[in-house]
Amino acid sequence: MSATTSLPRIVDVAASPFSLPLLRPVRSAVAQWHERAGVLLRVEDAEGVVGYGEASPLPGLSWETPEQVHAAFEALDDFVQQSEAGFAVEAERSSFAASVKPLTRVLPPTARHALEQALLDLLAKRRGISVAAWLAQVLVASTAAADTATLPHERIPVHALVRDAAEAATAVAAGYGTLKVKIAADEFEEDVARLAAIRDAVGANVKLRLDANGALTVEEAVAALEVFARFDVECCEQPVAAHDITGLAEVRRNQPVPVAADEAVRTAADAQRILEAQAADILVLKPMLIGGLLPALEIAQAACAEGVGVYATTSLDAALGRAGAVHLAAALPGPLLACGLATGELLAADLAPRDALPVEHGKMLVPPGPGLGVEPEVWPREPQDAQRKGGGA
Ligand SMILES: [Mg+2]
């Protein structure tokens, strides 16, 4: 392997804002989205190796805006340009996070995600391996988990988001084994009728996953899930508001459907509070909102140690963000639950070709790499035209 072994020095940072229309508005109980706006990040080291990352703040869930992220990346480029020989990044897991802390600590979560992802893309490319393999090496090195020998996974089971029995039947015919249904955006009786029709259409062997996006009170959630349990539900994501860990624990104790914490999981400290309160059976990992693949992986390890399941999902990210979540999923410990990664079909346009992250029979194929294995199709501004301030390779 012609992998590069010296320490990478980042000599150029370039950022390009994007806005991608959704095919149709996506509605949850807390917000409705019509487009995905974000910032694509490109880093380059002194040897000309390039890495890409994506920052896509989700309105309603992120406090930062794409404009703030873009401004932060311009400041980051100034910082890198002022460092005499570029910014050195440690290539080993044990020292990587500490070495990039001067760059990441002032950034909002989605910008931290983009920067970490771009650096991991670059580091993995230098080694000639996939980001998933880089992450899995981390895990194998740091845990005694018995099943790390199978890492990284090459195929990730993914769920299909469906709205009614017809969409459910189509998804199952295409090979999906797990279906996700949003609840609590309509009247309770409508949810009951919809779930009954979906279960009826797909039979007993398909998993049904619910998502309330935090819209219910504890009492409503307990009562609703008691009823929904008859449809043999795998789990319900975020039945109550994200801040209400005590309420989440109460819902978990008082009805039979397993509870998944989603919007409640934004930092390692959040995850620790949820684990200590025994408030969830499953933690949902959105690396874009958590602020990176490594922080998400650390949460996964903590959950795994407590016997709590995990799965990774996108936040309706564009192709680079989705690729990051796929590589994270490929490195997750424990038995793989279906992940929420097949969200690209919701976008009317994307940053990479549509077939970059293919799904076959309900499983997403992990790009073999090197790096993320997904490159932006068109860099919106060519770096040489983008007023590079010297120092680039
Ligand atoms: Mg959710």
Image (spheres, helix red, strand yellow):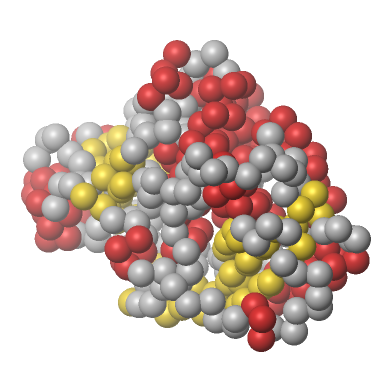
Residue 206 position within the rendered picture, expressed as x and y whole percent measured from the top left: 18, 39
In front here: 13 or 117? 13
Residue visible at 59% across and 47% down in the picture: 126
Provide residue 321's location: percent of width, then percent of height.
50, 59
> Eyeballing the image, is 333 above or below 340?
above
Quarter of image, res 294: top right
Q: Is residue 98 visible?
A: yes
Say if 113 sits above or below 328 in the image.
below
Kindly indicate the quadrant of the structure image that contains residue 93: top right
Q: Nearer the viewer, residue 71 or 248?
A: 71
**Residue at 77% in and 62% down:** 11
Q: Residue at x 42, y 38 (%)?
A: 330
Residue 91: x, y in percent? 69, 40
State the residue in front, 162 or 198.
162
Q: In this rendering, does residue 113 appear at all? A: no
Measured as percent of width and height from the top left, residue 391 is found at 81, 70
Given the current orientation, which residue lies at the most extreme front position? 2
Disc count in the image? 0
